[in-house]
Amino acid sequence: MKIKAQISMVMNLDKCLGCHTCSITCKNAWTNRKGTEYMYFNNVETRPGVGYPKGWEKQDEWKGGWTLDDKGRLKLRAGGKVERFIKLFYNPDQPGMDDYYEPWTYDYDELTAAGRKRHQPVARSRSLVTGERMDITWGPNWDDDLSGAPYARADVDLIAANAVGAQIKMDMEDLFMRYLPRTCNHCLNPACVAACPSGAIYKRDEDGVVLISQDACRGWRACVPACPYKKVYYNWETNKSEKCTFCFPRLESGMPTICSDTCVGRIRYMGVLLYDMDKVEAAASTEDPRDIWRAIKDVLVDPTDPAVIENARANGVAESWIDAAQHSPVYKLIKEWGLALPLHAEYRTLPMVWYIPPMSPILQRVAADTDLAQADEMRIPLAYLAELFSAGDPEPVRDVINRLVAVRAHMRAKEVGAPEPEAEFAPEVLDEMYRLLAIAKRPDRFNIPEAADMTRAERLKAQREFGFCTSCAEGGFNA
Amino acid sequence: MNGIDIFLWGIAPYISFTMLIAVTIIRRVHFARTWSSKSSEFLERKQERVANPLFHLSILFVFFGHVGGVLVPHEVTDALGVSEEMYHMAAFGMGGLFGVLLGIALILLIRRRFGGNERMKANTSTSDKVLYVVLTATIVMGLVATFSNASGAFNYRESLSPWFRSLFTFQPDIALMAQVPLAFKIHMCCWMILFAVLPFTRLVHMFSGITAPFKYARRKAVLYRARKHDVRANGARDLEFPDAIILDRK
């Protein structure tokens, strides 16, 4: 046993309204520089849809994540070390700019500076890469809100679900749609870290955040195709790779990431998980892809177990972090209540951003016979959600959604004075679930301990913030 | 032996080597953030697919060919029973083949970068332009020298190679360069300029290309790094990670 701490996130898709506030605040904080225009450390995809970059889930094409070799050992899908070195000179698995989009701006000056004309001035589009005029034919969220049927039908998970007999139709009366916000998953078994020939990508020992050292990166780009979620981006201006930082300067100060903090729907939860480092490799090597998510849950350990606490202390996990792990909203959602599932666990990277699958309106054809829809009667086919969250196994998704239905049934009974319906959880627990999921107050959603090993001055210095206090003892910081 | 000869064959090589070593170290230590292969595959994939692997493969062969021809004294090949004719046939054949391939790849790369692709234009810096001029001159003069000496009339292993080796004993034998044909002399000047500008350009990635495979082959898959060693916090430079601070998974 070797216990480490990991900052983790859960997103409650039931409440995502697809407003893109997370993407915008992230963009303003991190990727508003030249070369990063096309990068979305956080993006929101309409599902079904092709996602960003186009068709990122097609691992046969991109060779992202891990797979098992003949002997059942983990190996990168991109191939062995020699094979990947040959790909340095031309990487056939690397997405190009057109797989994302060519970023553009508009000639806004034209609107105010145009001389007297017969017609209204227009702000024409201009490429942010070349500076030339460009016609816009594709962009991020081009298929937002199912705009354009071909994109929804091209959804990889939809095709996969139909291939195993789900018969999901895209007819008007059965049409469904949900939003899927995505960030870097800060995986326990990150493929980007393993693929980097320079050793520039690493997992932080203290909080599990995966970062790229901009000094050590040599621009070999192996990380870009290796990440199955396509969340490492190549900066064509600085010629180095960049990725979501989990807003580590904010985490160090005990604040949630900017995407979580500004989430209008309050869908995001952040907290500490303790995990057993020694179990990571075995969990990632689980033979049946459908069992991987369960194996990940086994890697996440009970923070109240005395043996775990003792081992965590021995490994340098601070008391404040152990306490935070014991009061972690994320631990509750994933482990105690079993409400969250990982996105595409079959990529074997052990993602640490989990999702509560969404409920959806009752199907037209069963609406007459029932008053509270169960999972199988909802509009979003379970087979489709299963492709996203449980490697095609509908059982775990059904369980989660029926638990969410149980919370509703409980609250409904309470509201109308009906007898308490039979449920897996006690009424007090259902009340607690209701408060965390529906009310979702800020202190309940986030429990992030400050960096235990740094003073405030050190934190600010690490964040490249410099103080102006000349009378303070410690380097201009009022510590 | 006039002043120009002394400068070109006795002083300039040392300036070149000094620039190569000193600037590389300075850049590595103080400007590591600019150290990159500057891959442009993200912007242009179609032409790179053939041009780039061909260029790198042929330049590797050309490099090893130079090592063989310049650093290995002809006494060694004589002792191995390789006659002058056999040696020239092999060197001219292999060198000519990979030289031509390198030339083709270079033309393809020039077409890719300067052939009107607007995205590539946005990605081309001044150092890239300088590099392309110097690299093209070096490769072209290498090819001219090779094919102008197809007959093998000029035996560079009796003049050029000993002169080059004499540089390393800090007693440059300038007299050896007197009988060298002009094409070879220009080729010499080209590499001196190339070596001097190399550390200012993207070519520094070749050093990482040499070291990375060895480091990567030995390493565990997933790297952990403790923040207490994160040098940004203690004021030191954020360069590469000493092995001690990388915790393996087990």
Image: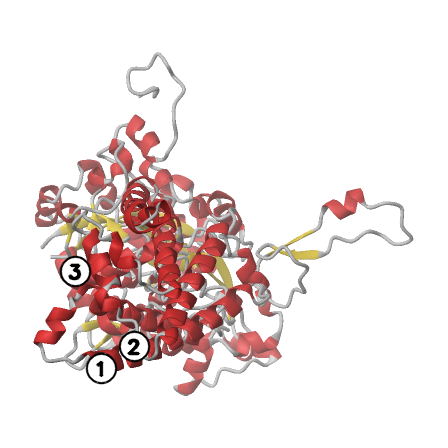
Q: Choose between A475 and A434: the one closer to the eye.
A: A475
Q: Earlier in the sequence, mark 1 or mark 3?
A: 1
Residues at marks 2 and 1 touching, judged by CB atoms closer than 8 Å = yes
Q: Amino acid at mark 2?
A: Gly
Mark nearer the viewer, 3 or 2? 2
- Alpha-carbon neighbours of circle 3 within 10 Å: few (<14), some, or many (≥20)? some
Count residues near mark 2 (Cα–Cα under 10 Å), then give few for <14, some for 14-19, many for 20+. some
What's the amino acid at mark 1?
Glu
Q: Tell me which chain the residue with mark 1 is part of.
A: B
In the image, residue B75 lies at what x, y percent? 12, 69
Q: What's the chain of the residue with tag 3?
A: B
Q: Amino acid at mark 3?
A: Lys
Count the marks. 3
Instruction: Left or right? Give the position of B185 relative to B172.
Output: right
* Inter-mark Cα distance, 3 to 2: 51 Å
Q: Give the Cα distance between marks 1 and 3.
A: 50 Å
Q: Which residue is mark 3?
A: B220
Let me know if marks 1 and 3 both belong to one chain.
yes
Res B41 visible: yes
Q: Indicate the chain on which mark 2 is placed.
A: B
* Contact (Cβ within 8 Å) of mark 1 with mark 3: no
Please name the residue that numbered disc 2 is placed on. Answer: B152
